[in-house]
Image (cartoon, grey):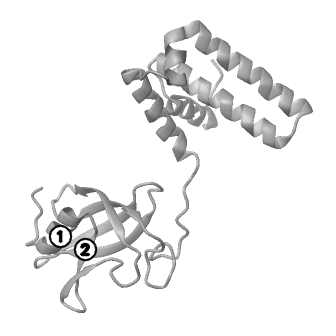
Amino acid sequence: MNIDFNKGDGLVPAIIQDAGTLKVLMLGYMNKEAYEKTVDTRLVTFWSRSRQCLWTKGETSGNMLHLVDIKLDCDNDTLLVKVHPDGPTCHTGTDTCWGETNEVNPLLFLSELSNFIEQRHREMPEGSYTTSLFRDGLNRMAQKVGEEALELVIEATNGTNDRLIYEGSDMLYHLIVLLTSKGLRIEDMARELMVRHNPGWKKH
């Protein structure tokens, strides 16, 4: 990675982002030594401009930032550092240095689940229910979506909210399996809904 440390007198900004929630947690600065220590230890380390020394985030509080990935911007002088944080990031005790709550958006899990099902489709491991669906073929996968949709309707009209969520989750899982078999993803449906949300959209 060809980082240009010269522009900032030996320092580059490091934007810290939670790899799971995608929330920006803080901004710090790294010199070459801090960058190399971060890569070597997998714990995010900065250069403290006030103390004029290296400091590993969380060395006092215990709220470490575990490195996931580092990306360099187009000018080679700013880092995007993706992490898994241990607890709050800000020294004030808040999740982020802007006082925001760093919570996982459950909708992001649908992409993660799609990735997992795609991996199952590629590897087809023995003993996996998802593998058995792919092996049973398109008609069986489509049938399972229909069966789960019917159970969803039954719970909606005569069941409880907990069972409605349970059956709806079953239907959504089987739908993602079906989409994967066709080379599609749940994001394709999300894009379609985005298009329909446009005031100028007209039904086909």
Q: Is residue 179 left or right of residue 33?
A: right
Residue 198: quadrant of the picture: top right
Residue 174: quadrant of the picture: top right
Q: Nearer the viewer, residue 60 or 178?
A: 60
At which x and y percent is residue 36? 14, 67
Q: Is residue 109 left or right of residue 32?
A: right
Q: Residue at x 36, y 78 (%)?
A: 58
Position of the C terminus, as image quadrant, is top right
Residue at mark 1: 37
In this view, which residue lies farthest toward the bottom?
51
In this view, which residue lies farthest toward the right?
158
Position of the N terminus, as image quadrant, is bottom left
Q: Is residue 132 above or below residue 85?
A: above
Describe the element under mark 2 as helix, strand or loop: strand
Q: Nearer the viewer, residue 60 or 10?
A: 60
Residue at mark 2: 45
Q: Is residue 107 above or below residue 192?
A: below
Q: Is residue 42 left or right of residue 129?
A: left
At which x and y percent is residue 138? 55, 9
Q: Residue at x 43, y 69 (%)?
A: 86
| Residue 137 in view in this figure | no
Asked if labels 2 and 1 touch by Cβ distance under 8 angstroms, the answer is yes
- On residue 143, the disc is none
Q: Amino acid at mark 2?
A: Thr
In this view, which residue lies farthest toward the front?
127
At which x and y percent is residue 29? 24, 76
Q: Nearer the viewer, residue 58 or 80?
A: 58
Residue 150: quadrant of the picture: top right
| Residue 34 in view in this figure | yes
